[in-house]
Amino acid sequence: MSKKTIDALRRADRAVVGALLLVAAIAVGAAALDPYTDSMPEGGAPSADAHGPSVSAAARPAASEVAMAQLLAERQCLAEAMYYEARSEGIVGQKAVAEVVFHRMRNRNYPGTICGVVFEGSRLKHACQFSFTCNGDMKRAKNPQAWAEARLLAAKIMTGAVQLGDITDNATSYHAVYVDPVWADHLIRTVQIGNHIFYRMPPRSRSS
């Protein structure tokens, strides 16, 4: 891995942390407006947990820690999708995959988080939405250079340093050029980018 790539990745990591701190601050502010208490439920009377003592506030992770962990996990999922699906497709191909992930997040037919979209169906046989989540690819060692580049791009997308356009024309699905899935006939083909052909849902299936 080149020093230039390492330095860029470090800068991106710092940018992500900065964005996380901002989100964490918002989360803390929201928690302050609606504080949680262990001993004073509705009605004002102390409560006892039937399953044992309640968890103290000190034992629970802070709202900022939860927010940061969630965003770091989301960045990891986005980087993995771009790496496994399009690491040989260059930045344009990886951004196209990222677009599909975000298009699905905005569609009521799919989960509302990056990790939810990427790993949907991965625990069910033949139900994974992204093949790498269930075909064993994730058990193999990553290419350090390609993985660093995917992480860097994911960080830039998450912090807004790289803006996604709509080069896939609202696509929510794609497949490699060398396969012919049965579902493709039920969707609208939009564009081919590298070795992937992209599709969007018919108008009646789109999120409002």
Image (cartoon, rainbow, N blue to C red):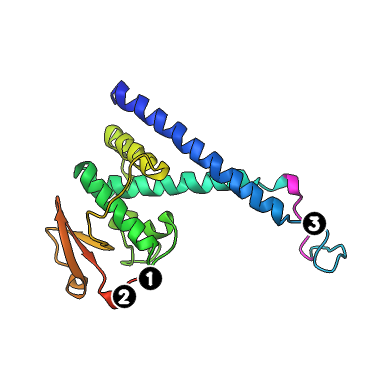
Magenta-highlighted residues: 50-58
Quadrant position of the C terminus in the picture? bottom left
Q: In terms of sequence position, does the residue under pointer 1 or pointer 2 come before the other?
A: 1
Above or below — where is 155 with respect to 137? Answer: above
Residue 85 x/y as whole percent = 26, 50
Magenta stretch contains residue 198 = no
Write down the residue under mark 3. 53
Give the Cα separation between the discs numbered 1 and 2. 8 Å
Write down the residue under mark 1. 109
Give the Cα separation between the discs numbered 3 and 2. 48 Å
Residue 59 x/y as whole percent = 72, 46
Above or below — where is 196 with respect to 142? Answer: below
Above or below — where is 110 with respect to 26? Answer: below
Write down the residue under mark 2. 205
Around disc 2, counting alpha carbons within 10 Å, would you say few (fewer than 14), some (14 to 19), or many (20 or more)?
Answer: few
Disc 1 marks a residue whose amino acid type is Asn
- Taking the spot 83% from the left edge, 63% from the top edge, the residue there is 48
Give the Cα separation between the discs numbered 1 and 3. 40 Å
Residue 79 x/y as whole percent = 35, 45
